[in-house]
C-alpha cells in the first residue's frame, strides 16, 4: 500500500488531521466527503476534469533541464514547470477539481482564501469558466503586497474582501472564509486552497494535485530512466509539495519540503489544532497561534497540512527552512542563470538547493517550480531598491 | 424521554430552575477584558442563571466582529487562560460558571490538566465550539472523570438522526445554535432558532438554550417561547465595550424582566 493512501475514517494521517469544525459545518464536510468519493470513482467526472486540465489549464506541464545552474551547482537540476499552467501556478489543478465537484453538488457559489493571490486567481478563473459566483478573502497586508493579483481577481468577476483581523495575512483569510461558509453552507462550497483544513480537504486536495507527481514520475522515466535522487518543493500549507511528493513517496527518492524561517510549522511548531485540523503549528505557551512572518505571502502561514506533519513524524520527508535573504538571492539567481522568474514561494526551494548543493554533488534534483514570479516583480523592485 | 441524569453542578441548577417555571438566562463575558470580573458580578446580580466566561483565542472562527474585538483586546492586555482562571477563582457569584474556549486551548494544556485547571478555578462546565461530536471523545472522557460538564452544540444543519447523539453526549445543557452564521447581533431572531429548539425539545429533556443571534430582550423573549433559555453574547459585550461592566448588568436585568414577563 502506498504511504500516501487514503486517510483513516476520521481523516487521520497517523495522529494528524481530523475534522475540528463548528457543528454547523460537520454535515457539509460529511456531504463533501461523500460527494468527492463518489465523483473520484466516476469515470465521467475524471474525464471531465482531465479534459479541463488538458484543454484549459494546459497540462501536462513540461520538465525543464537547468543546464547553466546544473553546471554551477554540480548537480543535475530539473524543474517541473507548474508555472506554465494557466493562471500561473499549480493551484489550478485543485481549483478545477473542486469547482467541478461543487457544480456536481449543486452549489452556485465559491468562497476561497488566498495568500499570494494565486489560489484566489485560480478560484476566480474556475468560477468564470463554470459560471459560478466567487468571493475571495485575502489578508489586508497581502492585498497591498499582491495588488496585481487583486486586480486580476476582480477582472475575472470575483469579489475580493480585505481581511482586517489578526495578522491580516493568510491565517486570517482562512478564518474569514470559514466564517462565511458557516453562514452560507447551504448554497456555497468552500474552495480551500491547500492540503489543509478539515477532512476531507487534505486528502481531496492532494488527490487533485497528484497529477503533478504522476506526470513528473513518467517524465523522469522518459528523460533518464529513473526516479530523481531528491525532490524539492516549498511548503506553506503544502499543496504543491504534496502533489510532487505523491509521485515519488514509495520510491527511494529523498523528499524535501522547504519552509520559510518565519513560518516554519514543522521546524518550530508543536502539534496543535486550528483551521479544522491537528497538525504542526507555531503557537505560544498557551496555544495561541503565532503570526508567521515571511517575504512570501503564499507561505506566510503558521500551520501546515496534516499529511506533511505525518511524513515528518515518520521521517519520510524533511522540512528545512530558509531565510528571506536566501530567498531574494535565489529569486534573482534563477532569473539570471536560466531566464525564468520564479514565484517567491518557489524561490524557497531553490534557496535550499543552492545552500545544500555541496552535499548533493552529482545528484539528480527535481524541483517543483509551482508558480511564476510576475506577481512578485513589484515587491522585488521595492526590496532591491532598498 | 430518558435523558441521562447528571449530577453536574450546572445541569442540576438549570433543571431545578426550569422545574420552578423559570426561563434560563446565560450571559457570555470575555475573560481578561478590562472590567470582566465586575461584569460577571453585575450580570450575576441581575438575574443570570449561569455565566459563560470566554477564554480568548487568536483564531476565533465561530465569532463575529464584536467578540473578535473583545478577544483581541483581552489578548493584547496580556490575558492568558491561566491568568483568567486564576481570576475566576476569586469570583463568588453563587451561580455556576462555564468556560467557552476553542479546542487548541484545551489541546495545548492537555485534556486532564485542563479539566483540573477548570475544577480548581471553580468552573463547572466547558463549551468548545470547534470540537464536534466525532472529535469530542478524548476531551469528554477527561472532563467526565473530573466532573466537568461539556455542553454540546447542535446546529440547524444537523439531520434528524444526529440530534439524539448530540443530546446524549451533552452535559449541562444543549446549545441550540440559532442561525447559520457566527456570533453577533441581528435585527431579527432567525426562523431557524425556534425550529431547531423545537426539534431538540422533542428528543431530550436536557435543558435546551438558544445562542448565536439572540440580540435583545424582545428576541430573548421570543426564543424562550420554545427553548428553556437563551445565551446572550455579542449584545452584552458590545454594551460592556461601549459603557463598561455596569451596562452589561443593566442590560441583563432588562432581558430578565422581558423573559419573566
Image (cartoon, rainbow, N blue to C red):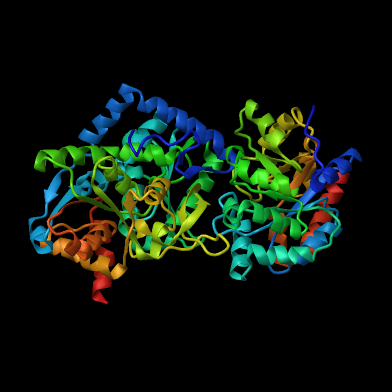
Residue A200 position within the rendered picture, expressed as x and y whole percent measured from the top left: 45, 37
Query: Is residue A60 among the parts visible in the rendering?
Result: no
Q: Position of residue B52 (x, y in %)?
A: 73, 53
Residue A284 can be seen, yes or no? yes
Name which residue lies at 72% across and 46% down. Answer: B145
- How many numbered marks does the figure carry? 0
In the rendered view, tell whether residue B154 sits above or below residue A140.
above
Residue A243 relative to residue B219: left or right: left
Image location (x, y in percent) of residue B176: 69, 39
Q: Specify whether B177 is left or right of B216.
A: left
Residue nearest the observer in this picture, B233 or B127: B127
Residue A342 x, y percent position in the rendering: 22, 57
Tell me: residue A31, above or below residue B144.
above
Q: Quadrant of residue B237?
A: bottom right
Horizontal side, residue A21 vs residue A124: left or right: right
Q: Is residue A358 above or below residue B182?
A: below
The quadrant of the image that shows the C terminus of chain A is bottom left
Q: Nearer the viewer, residue A144 or A35?
A: A35
The residue at 22%/44% (across/down) is: A85
Up-down relation of residue A263 to residue B26 (above or below): below
- Residue at x 27% of width, y 26% of height: A47
Name the residue located 25 percent from the left edge and 31 percent from the top edge: A50
Residue B77: which quarter of the image? Answer: bottom right
* Residue that sits furthest to the right in the current view: B20
Q: Which quadrant, please, contains the N terminus of chain A? A: top left
Amino acid at each position: 500500500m502506498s504511504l500516501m493512501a487514503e486517510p483513516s475514517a476520521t481523516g487521520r494521517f497517523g495522529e494528524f488531521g481530523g475534522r475540528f469544525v463548528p457543528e454547523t459545518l460537520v454535515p457539509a464536510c460529511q456531504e463533501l466527503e461523500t460527494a468527492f468519493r463518489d465523483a473520484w470513482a466516476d469515470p465521467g467526472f475524471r474525464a471531465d476534469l482531465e479534459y479541463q486540465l488538458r484543454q484549459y489549464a494546459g497540462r501536462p506541464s513540461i520538465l525543464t533541464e537547468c543546464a547553466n545552474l546544473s553546471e554551477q551547482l554540480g548537480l543535475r537540476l530539473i524543474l517541473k514547470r507548474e508555472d506554465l499552467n494557466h493562471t500561473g501556478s499549480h493551484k489550478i489543478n485543485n481549483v478545477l477539481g473542486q469547482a467541478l465537484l461543487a457544480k456536481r453538488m449543486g452549489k452556485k457559489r465559491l468562497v476561497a482564501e488566498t495568500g499570494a493571490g494565486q489560489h484566489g486567481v485560480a478560484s476566480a478563473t474556475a468560477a468564470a469558466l463554470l459560471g459560478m459566483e466567487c468571493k475571495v478573502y485575502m489578508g489586508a497586508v497581502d492585498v497591498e503586497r499582491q495588488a496585481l493579483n487583486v486586480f486580476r481577481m476582480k477582472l475575472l468577476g470575483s469579489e475580493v474582501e480585505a481581511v482586517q483581523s489578526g495578522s491580516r495575512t493568510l491565517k486570517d483569510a482562512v478564518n474569514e472564509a470559514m466564517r462565511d461558509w458557516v453562514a452560507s453552507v447551504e448554497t456555497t462550497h468552500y474552495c480551500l486552497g491547500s492540503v489543509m483544513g478539515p477532512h476531507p480537504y487534505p486528502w481531496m486536495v492532494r488527490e487533485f494535485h497528484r497529477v503533478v507527481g504522476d506526470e513528473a514520475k513518467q517524465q523522469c522515466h522518459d528523460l533518464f530512466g529513473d526516479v530523481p535522487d531528491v525532490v524539492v518543493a516549498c511548503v506553506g500549507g503544502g499543496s504543491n509539495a504534496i502533489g510532487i511528493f505523491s509521485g515519488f513517496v514509495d520510491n527511494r527518492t529523498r523528499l524535501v519540503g522547504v519552509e520559510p524561517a518565519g513560518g516554519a510549522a514543522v521546524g518550530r511548531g508543536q502539534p496543535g489544532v486550528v483551521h479544522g485540523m491537528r497538525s504542526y503549528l507555531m503557537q505560544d505557551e498557551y496555544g495561541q497561534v503565532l503570526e508567521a512572518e515571511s517575504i512570501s505571502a503564499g507561505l506566510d502561514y503558521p500551520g501546515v497540512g496534516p499529511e506533511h506533519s505525518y511524513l515528518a513524524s515518520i521521517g519520510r520527508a524533511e522540512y528545512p527552512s530558509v531565510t528571506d535573504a536566501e530567498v531574494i538571492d535565489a529569486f534573482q539567481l534563477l532569473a539570471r542563470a536560466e531566464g525564468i522568474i520564479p514565484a517567491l514561494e518557489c524561490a524557497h526551494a531553490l534557496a535550499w538547493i543552492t545552500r545544500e548543493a555541496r552535499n548533493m554533488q552529482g545528484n539528480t534534483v527535481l524541483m517543483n517550480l509551482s508558480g511564476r514570479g510576475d506577481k512578485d516583480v513589484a515587491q522585488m523592485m521595492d526590496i532591491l531598491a532598498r | 424521554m430518558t435523558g441521562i441524569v447528571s449530577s453536574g453542578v450546572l445541569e442540576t441548577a438549570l433543571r431545578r430552575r426550569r422545574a420552578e417555571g423559570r426561563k434560563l438566562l446565560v450571559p457570555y463575558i470575555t475573560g481578561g477584558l478590562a472590567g470582566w470580573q465586575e461584569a460577571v458580578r453585575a450580570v450575576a446580580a441581575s438575574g443570570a442563571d449561569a455565566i459563560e466566561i470566554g477564554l480568548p483565542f487568536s483564531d476565533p472562527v465561530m465569532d463575529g466582529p464584536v467578540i473578535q474585538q473583545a478577544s483581541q483586546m483581552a489578548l493584547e492586555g496580556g490575558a492568558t487562560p491561566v491568568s483568567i482562571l486564576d481570576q475566576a477563582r476569586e469570583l463568588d457569584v453563587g451561580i455556576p460558571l462555564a468556560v467557552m474556549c476553542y479546542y487548541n486551548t484545551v489541546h495545548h494544556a492537555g485534556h486532564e490538566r485542563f479539566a483540573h485547571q477548570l475544577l480548581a478555578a471553580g468552573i463547572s462546565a466547558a463549551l468548545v465550539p470547534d470540537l464536534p461530536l466525532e472529535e469530542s471523545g478524548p476531551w469528554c472522557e477527561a472532563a467526565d472523570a473530573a466532573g466537568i460538564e461539556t455542553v454540546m452544540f447542535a446546529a440547524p444543519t444537523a439531520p434528524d438522526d444526529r440530534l439524539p447523539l448530540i443530546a446524549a453526549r451533552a452535559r449541562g445543557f444543549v446549545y441550540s445554535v440559532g442561525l447559520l452564521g457566527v456570533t453577533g447581533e441581528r435585527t431579527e431572531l432567525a426562523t431557524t432558532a425556534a425550529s431547531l429548539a423545537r426539534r431538540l425539545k422533542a428528543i431530550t429533556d436536557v435543558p435546551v438554550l438558544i445562542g448565536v443571534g439572540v440580540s435583545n430582550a424582545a428576541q430573548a423573549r421570543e426564543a424562550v417561547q420554545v427553548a428553556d433559555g437563551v445565551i446572550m453574547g455579542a449584545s452584552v459585550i458590545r454594551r460592556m465595550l461601549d459603557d463598561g461592566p455596569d451596562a452589561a448588568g443593566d442590560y441583563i436585568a432588562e432581558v430578565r424582566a422581558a423573559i419573566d414577563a
